[in-house]
Image (cartoon, rainbow, N blue to C red):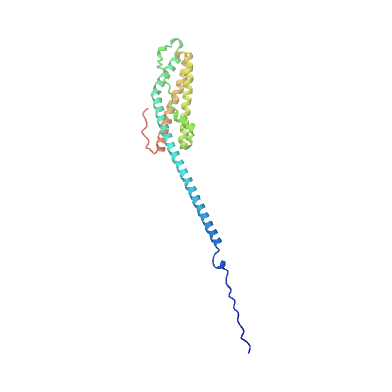
Amino acid sequence: MPEPPVETSVAVTAPPESRHAHPTVRHKSAWLLKIALEVVLISVGVFLALMGEQWRDRSQTRELTQISLRSFREEILTNRAAVSAVRDYHVTLLKSLRAYLAADPKARRTDSVRINGLQPVFFERTSWDMALATQSLVHLDPKIAYNLSRIYGLQQTYSDSTRGIMQAIYLRSLMENVEGLTAYYGDLVLWEPQLLRLYDEILPQIDRALGEAPERKPSN
């Protein structure tokens, strides 16, 4: 009697790596994740550091700008007071000089011209020189910087003219320089009202930039 066929069954077993990740793969994935996390943390740290540095720079710039504006304000007030103090004297002296020159040369009397010294204005300009040296003007409002440039430019023209007349009177007496003095004071009586107007225009601008209420216009 023939023997029944024997069924042979072969169990196919999946390789271990198909059921569980290989330890090397797991280690590599964890390493990449760690590197990615470190890159993110470093990037965030660098970004925050840059933001902090920019904030400090802006804070320092604001502080320096405030200091510069306050310095300009005090200097302009000082110069304004100096101009206002001598303006009337210059106007009166100019009238006397012109009357003296208009008179007949034979009838001219030197005692008709009362000269109580030249009495020019010697302007303060430390704030302007510091602003130029430190290049802090670039941080000011452009309109304020422009008006400051106009003021200090006119003051320099005034000072140059004063220097010229003072050199002249070292060579000749005042009454020997009547024509030169008349031209000098003729310029001053034009420049001084212009300076007072420029001072009065910029002071409220500086006050607003400082966040303060503009003070009342100083009396002339």
Residue 139 drawn at (x, y percent): 47, 37
Question: At 48% across and 17% down in the image, what residue appears?
Answer: 167
Residue 144 drawn at (x, y percent): 45, 35
* Viewer-proximal residue among 150 and 68: 68
Residue 167 in the figure: left or right of residue 207: right
Number of labels in the image equals 0
Question: At 48% across and 26% down in the image, what residue appears?
Answer: 156
Residue 12 drawn at (x, y percent): 58, 73
* Viewer-proximal residue among 39 and 34: 34
**Residue 95 position (above or below residue 67):** above
Question: Which of the image's four quarters has the C terminus?
Answer: top left
* Viewer-proximal residue among 95 and 117: 117
Question: Which of the image's four quarters has the N terminus?
Answer: bottom right
Residue 131 in the figure: left or right of residue 1: left
**Residue 216 position (above or below residue 26):** above
Question: At 45% across and 26% down in the image, what residue appears?
Answer: 191
